[in-house]
Image (spheres, rainbow, N blue to C red):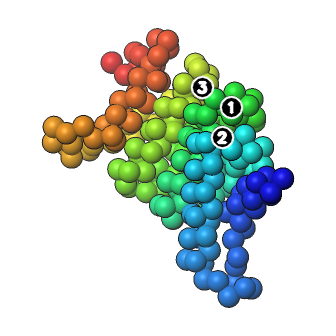
Amino acid sequence: AARKQAVTMLAAVAVNPPGKKSGVSPRESEETAYRCLLGLAKLSQRDSAYLVLTNGGPRAAIDCLRLYPANMDVTYAAFKVLRGLLGNPSTMMKLRKQKRFRIVPAAVVDGVYRHDSLDVKAEAAHCLWTYSGVGGVDAQDLVIGVDFLPVLKSGLEEARALDKGRSDARVRKFVGCTLALAKANEPVQDLLV
């Protein structure tokens, strides 16, 4: 019961951090939201993922993407929460059945276009890689429909230029997302060739 209350509180505080009435600046409120999302992200990658799913984790992640559009750290942490829930065996199918599942690609792409950062693009690709694997052809079509291919292309080119022969995890994320989008989907394969 205490763990459930803690997860619920993290999700609630991420969306509604202490504000002006309590003497907290907007920057400090965003930092609080970021830390709450990081906590939810860590929990979503472990045994507590089901608690995060059922107690407002996906809603908090998507709402924070919309509430704090200028904060790159919050965007990155929200992607990690979504990826953790999509990659955890105990939550992936339950999240797929939620209505919120269909808006994940649009929310992720909105976050990417607000920040010109290779790390944000790579984390978005990682999130949508997992999303495409869980959702199948329908999810692949949703990702293609929100115009994510230019982000993949530019991010992969930028990551390869910075890689210099070493194995950069960002390159792996872009390539993995591209392959997940093309798996068993001939129209997407034709787009990528």
Q: Nearer the viewer, residue 122 or 86?
A: 86
In the displayed structure, would residue 134 be above or below residue 63?
A: above
Under mark 1, the amino acid is: Ser
Q: Nearer the viewer, mark 2 or mark 3?
A: 2
The residue wearing badge 3 is 134
In the displayed structure, would residue 104 be above or below residue 113?
A: above
- The spot of residue 71 in percent (x, y) is 51, 64
Under mark 2, the amino acid is: Asp
Would residue 39 be found to the left or right of residue 125 on screen?
right
Sequence-wise, the earlier of marks 1 and 3 is 1
Corner quadrant of residue 93: top right
Question: For numbered disc 3, what is the local secondary structure?
Answer: helix
Label annotation for residue 90? 1
Would residue 125 be found to the left or right of residue 156 on screen?
right
- The spot of residue 83 in percent (x, y) is 56, 40
The residue wearing badge 2 is 47
- The spot of residue 171 in percent (x, y) is 31, 37
